[in-house]
Image (tube, coloured by chain):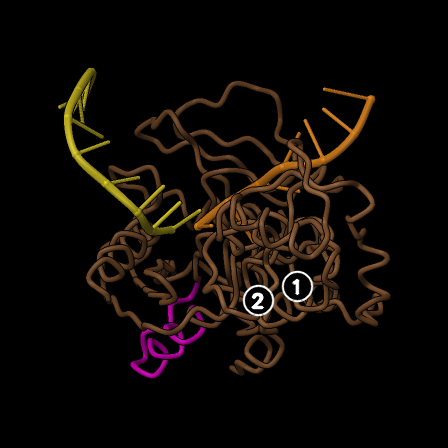
Chain colours: A brown, B orange, C yellow
DNA sequence: GCGACAG
DNA sequence: ATCTTGTCGC
């Protein structure tokens, strides 16, 4: 199993964002949404906004030239008052309602200013990778009932990611093995790009388990599989990279629509996406009010997902291997510093 | 009516 | 996901 599929392609998004911000000329401003478009996906606007608030402010950093929609100030990380003074010093007219419209640079102008072509945008490249990987997904019944199943999850403490792998027997659900790794998180959380944040630590912990001969027949991942805008959620991405059966499990639905029927304890309802039955919503036998969503990862089918996961619920909302991986990774992350 | 959106 | 205190319920 190779890890080059992720590590080699993950861009330093923060460095690129800093470059984009540095290129905003004095006397002009832009918005989080325009910067996100330069990065290749408007969806990243939220990350750009939180980054501005939390970033390590450098003396030469031009973050005061980023404003909110409509030119309103604030949330820059340096404070609205400081931002207003800096902008006025550059000749930007700052009115009570925000900066004047003509000072705002749109995504088009900003792109040409930076000489950024469409195909240079990092998130666009990552989407292309997902679309390419999607072709490699295999939907098929499991060759046989598994003898075990593992859950994987990742928790965070600052810039550190803690990945845990927990293997249980199938169908008994007895815990057989648990291990973890800690590594630096290299990419932010942006919806639909989760794999570029979490797959690297996940692969590390799975590789560690494999070295100790603890690789399970099926791996369940805390995240979507084919129920993803480009059919390449982290569970499918992981599955294709290691070419083994994977199942995606989430507490909320990323995309897809479910059958409009009553969901009884222990029951399932189909979830369709792009006209295909790729997942189910499943309520545990014990009847937790909140169900979970299963989606096909790789080398499995919807029926297989349900058959593998259903016996692994104990007293929690999530199936045991995922529940334990979540709990341990969180505990380990908390101890970090 | 439009857009949201996993962790 | 994480930041956070007490509080309601099985």
Q: Would you say residue A60 sits in the magenta stretch?
A: no
**What percent of the width, then of the height, locates residue A178?**
25, 66
Q: Are marks 2 and 1 on the same chain?
A: yes
Give A13 or A327, whichever is nearer the viewer.
Answer: A13
Specify start and end residues of the magenta stretch as a single range.
Answer: A202-218
Q: Which residue position is annotated with label 2?
A: A61
Q: Is residue B3 above or below residue A213?
A: above
Left-right relation of A323 to A175: right
**What percent of the width, then of the height, locates residue A165?**
33, 65
Q: Which residue position is annotated with label 1?
A: A21
| Other residues around mark 1 within 10 Å, as few (<14) / some (14–19) / many (≥20) | many
**What percent of the width, then of the height, locates residue A130?**
69, 64
Q: Is residue A266 above or below residue A25?
A: above
Q: CA distance from mark 2 to mark 1?
A: 8 Å
Q: Residue at x 53, y 74 (%)?
A: A242
Cβ atoms under marks 2 and 1 closer than 8 Å = yes
Left-right relation of A258 to B3: left
Q: Is residue A208 above or below residue A124?
A: below
Give A179 or A74, whichever is nearer the viewer.
Answer: A74
Q: Which mark is residue A101?
A: none
Indicate the chain on which mark 2 is placed.
A
Give A110 or A277, whichever is nearer the viewer.
Answer: A110
Indicate the chain on which mark 1 is placed.
A
Q: Residue at x 73, y 68 (%)?
A: A125
- Element at label 2: loop
């Amino acid at each position: 199993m190779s890890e080059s599929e992720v590590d080699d392609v993950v861009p330093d998004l923060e460095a690129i964002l800093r470059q984009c911000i540095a290129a905003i000329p004095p006397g002009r401003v832009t918005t989080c949404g325009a910067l996100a478009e330069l990065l290749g996906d408007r969806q990243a606007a939220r990350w750009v906004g939180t980054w501005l608030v939390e970033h390590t402010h450098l003396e030469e950093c031009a973050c005061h030239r980023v404003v909110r929609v409509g030119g309103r100030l604030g949330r820059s990380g340096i404070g609205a008052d400081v931002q207003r003074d800096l902008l006025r010093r550059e000749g930007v007219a700052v009115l009570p309602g925000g900066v004047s419209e003509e000072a705002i640079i749109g995504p088009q102008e900003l792109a040409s200013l930076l000489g950024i072509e469409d195909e240079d945008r990092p998130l666009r490249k990552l989407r292309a990778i997902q679309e390419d990987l999607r072709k490699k997904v295999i939907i098929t019944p499991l060759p046989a009932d598994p003898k075990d199943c593992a859950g994987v999850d990742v928790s965070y403490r600052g810039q550190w990611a803690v990945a845990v792998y927990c293997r249980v027997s199938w169908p008994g659900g007895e815990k057989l093995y648990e291990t973890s790794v800690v590594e630096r998180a290299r990419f932010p959380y942006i919806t639909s790009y989760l794999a570029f944040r979490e797959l690297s630590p996940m692969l590390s912990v799975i590789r560690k388990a494999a070295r100790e001969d603890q690789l399970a027949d099926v791996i369940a991942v805390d995240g979507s599989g084919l129920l993803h805008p480009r059919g390449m959620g982290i569970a499918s991405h992981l599955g294709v990279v290691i070419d083994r059966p994977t199942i995606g499990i989430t507490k909320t639905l990323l995309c897809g629509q479910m059958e409009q029927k009553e969901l009884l304890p222990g029951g399932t309802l189909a979830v369709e996406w792009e006209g295909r039955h790729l997942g189910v919503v499943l309520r545990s036998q014990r009847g937790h009010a909140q169900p979970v969503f299963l989606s096909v990862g790789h080398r499995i089918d919807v029926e297989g997902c349900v058959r593998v996961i259903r016996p692994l619920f104990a007293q929690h909302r999530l199936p045991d291997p995922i529940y334990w991986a979540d709990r341990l990774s969180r505990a380990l992350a908390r101890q970090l510093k």
